[in-house]
């Protein structure tokens, strides 16, 4: 019989695997966004989009006690996405 910590770690491991799959999907979409921005000479940073996403996502968050922790998590997601887009842009410029 599993104790509480073993059950919790099992859940965490499963969630982490699901998050990897979702991360890959999100980064593929970020690549598509970067390609569009490059083709249309748009900046990587779109603050209004980030603000709208954050608001929309926080509205979906059922446990408001976790809001500040979600913000930390989401900041990391946005940072990774922008870094990836910047790397794609740099790579494109270097290949010209």
Image: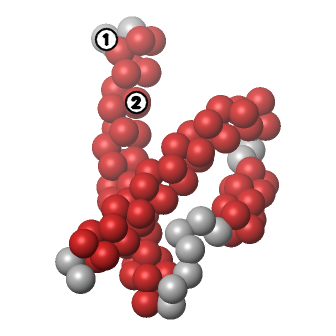
Quarter of the image where one finds residue 70: top right
The residue labelled by disc 1 is: 1
Task: Name the N-terminal-most of marks 2 and 1.
Answer: 1
Choose between 13 and 46: the one closer to the eye: 46
Image quarter in which the C terminus is found: bottom left
At horizontal 61% and vertical 36% (from top left) the residue drawn is 72
- Closest to the observer: 64 or 49? 49
Q: Is residue 22 left or right of residue 52?
A: left
Of residue 76 and residue 42, the one placed in the foreground of this image is 42
Residue 62: horizontal and vertical position, in percent? 74, 44
Which is more foreground, mark 2 or mark 1?
2
When the figure is inspected, residue 65 is found, relative to residue 27, above or below; the finding is above
Report whether residue 12 is seen: yes
Q: Nearer the viewer, residue 45 or 17?
A: 45
Spatial CA span between label 2 and label 1: 18 Å
**Residue of label 2:** 12
Q: Residue at x 33, y 67 (%)?
A: 90
**Position in image of residue 35 (x %, y %):** 39, 81
């Amino acid at each position: 019989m599993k104790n509480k910590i073993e059950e919790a770690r099992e859940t965490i491991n499963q969630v982490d695997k699901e998050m990897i799959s979702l991360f890959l999907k999100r980064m593929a979409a970020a690549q598509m966004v970067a390609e569009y921005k490059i083709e249309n000479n748009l900046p990587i940073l779109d603050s209004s989009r980030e603000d709208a996403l954050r608001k929309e996502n926080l509205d979906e968050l059922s446990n408001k006690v976790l809001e500040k922790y979600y913000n930390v998590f989401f900041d990391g997601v946005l940072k990774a996405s922008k870094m990836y887009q910047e790397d794609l842009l740099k790579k494109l410029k270097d290949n010209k």
